[in-house]
Structures are given as C-alpha cells and as structure tokens.
Amino acid sequence: MKRTFSTKPLLPLVLAWTSVLVTGCTSTKESVLPQDGPTMKSIYDQHMVGVHRSSHRQTIGSQPLPNSGIEHYQGFVREAANEIDTVFPRLPNPTLVMYIFPHLSGSERTPVLGYVTTFPFYETVEYALPGEVPMEAAVPLTSDK
C-alpha cells in the first residue's frame, strides 16, 4: 500500500508565508529606524559633560581621590603577579639541579659542552585552592632558571 501526498493543502500556507515575507521586505529603513533623533556623537558628548565635572572627579563616595601618583594605590591595584600569588598559591615542588659534564654524543662522537638542567620532583605544577594553604607555606611564582 503506497501513500501519496497531496500538495493542495500546503499551497495556501506557502502563499500566505510568501506574502508575509515579501511585505516585510518592502519596508524602508526610515520607517523602521527613524532618522530624526539625536546622533550618537551628541549622546556621547552629553554624557561626558556630566562625567568631566570637577566635583565628580574629586570625590567618590565620601573619600577624595589623590591628585597624582600611584603610591596612594599601593596594595589596592590588582596586578597579574600579586593576584595569582595571593589567590592561587603554588604548592611546594622541590627541584633537583643537575650538572651534566662535557661528553661525546652519538655514533659520530659529537662533543657536547657541559650544562646545567633542572628536574622538578613532581611532573606537574600544582596550585592550591583559595584558603587551602597558609600564605607562608606557599611558594612564590618565580622562574626556575
């Protein structure tokens, strides 16, 4: 038993959607977005006039801002180095420093100069969660060279 589909019931629906889409495309930019409002530059300038008032710059809340210098912000400025050190301290991972003596390498007996290399005891560097390790037990982030 074969089923046959008729397209006659779908024809009015397709025609209705087509007419809606064609009608939507005939609108103009001016009818959708009116052009008689203020420009973005005038809105920005109006906002910035209020921001640049001297009384606004001198006080935030009840405390006045310092006139110049960054030393007033010492301890309050967020930097990547002190942020990672304080929030996610590095767990201790001792490093073995090894000196490789000068030697001849490979079947061609190529001379290799002596050099120093380091091996961390653990394969990966682990970081503690905030508050997991007291700050004096944490290892500062320094490059191992």
Image (spheres, helix red, strand yellow):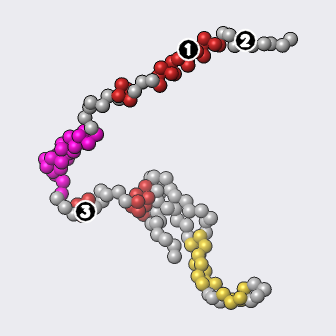
Is residue 52 rendered magenta in the image? yes
Looking at the image, do the residues carrying marks 2 and 1 touch, with CB atoms under 8 Å apart? no
Q: Determine the residue positioned at 18% across, 57% down.
A: 66
Highlighted range, magenta: 40-66
Q: CA distance from mark 1 to mark 3?
A: 67 Å
Instruction: Look at the numbered disc 1 and give the secondary structure of its residue.
Output: helix
The x, y position of residue 80, in whole percent, is: 41, 59
Residue of label 3? 70
Outermost residue toward the left? 55
Instruction: Look at the numbered disc 2 and give the secondary structure of its residue.
Output: loop
Q: CA distance from mark 2 to mark 1?
A: 18 Å
Looking at the image, do the residues carrying marks 2 and 3 touch, with CB atoms under 8 Å apart? no
Q: Determine the residue positioned at 84% across, 13% down.
A: 2
Residue of label 2? 6
Q: Residues within 10 Å of mark 1 (few under 14, many from 20)?
A: few
54 relative to 83, above or below: above
Q: How many marks?
A: 3
